[in-house]
Image (spheres, rainbow, N blue to C red):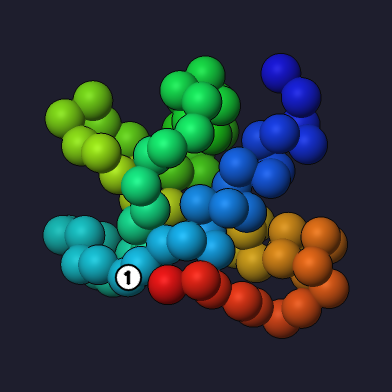
């Protein structure tokens, strides 16, 4: 799988995310899973997000959020931008 696709997918998930309570973990970013299931499964396996077949959205893990923030700087050259 192409690492650029994985990075850009994580970046877009982050940019379009909203914050939601994820018990027992606290507030996390959540985003609709409107991307390739193969890429989402890989990001899940890498511990960057948590997905479920029963939900139309995914939670970004703390690690996934930190990586996405680094990707914002890498690709956009900004501290943080969110569309939501």
Quarter of the rendering containing residue 67? bottom right
Q: Is residue 69 left or right of residue 23?
A: right
Comparing 4 with 45, the one in front is: 4
Task: Answer yes or no: is residue 3 visible.
Answer: yes
Residue shown at the point (71%, 34%) measured from the top left: 5
Residue 66 picture location, percent across and down: 60, 63
Q: Residues within 10 Å of mark 1 (few under 14, many from 20)?
A: some
Image location of residue 17, percent across then percent down: 42, 62
Residue placed under numbered mark 1 in the picture: 19
Residue 59 position in % (x across, y down): 35, 50
The residue shown at (58%, 53%) is 12
- The quadrant in which the N terminus is found is top right
82 relative to 59 in the view: left or right = right
Image height of 6 relative to 45, above or below: below
Horizontal side, residue 58 vs residue 78: left or right: left
* Residue 62 visible in the picture: no
Note whether 68 is above or below 78 in the view shown: above
Decide: is 20 above or below 53.
Answer: below
């Amino acid at each position: 799988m192409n690492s650029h696709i994985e990075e850009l997918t994580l970046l877009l998930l982050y940019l379009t995310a909203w914050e939601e309570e994820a018990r027992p973990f606290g507030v996390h970013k959540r985003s609709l899973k409107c991307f390739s299931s193969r890429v989402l499964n890989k990001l899940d396996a890498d511990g960057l997000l948590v997905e479920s077949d029963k939900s139309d959205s995914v939670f970004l893990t703390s690690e996934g959020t930190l990586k996405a923030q680094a990707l914002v700087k890498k690709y956009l050259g900004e501290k943080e931008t969110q569309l939501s």
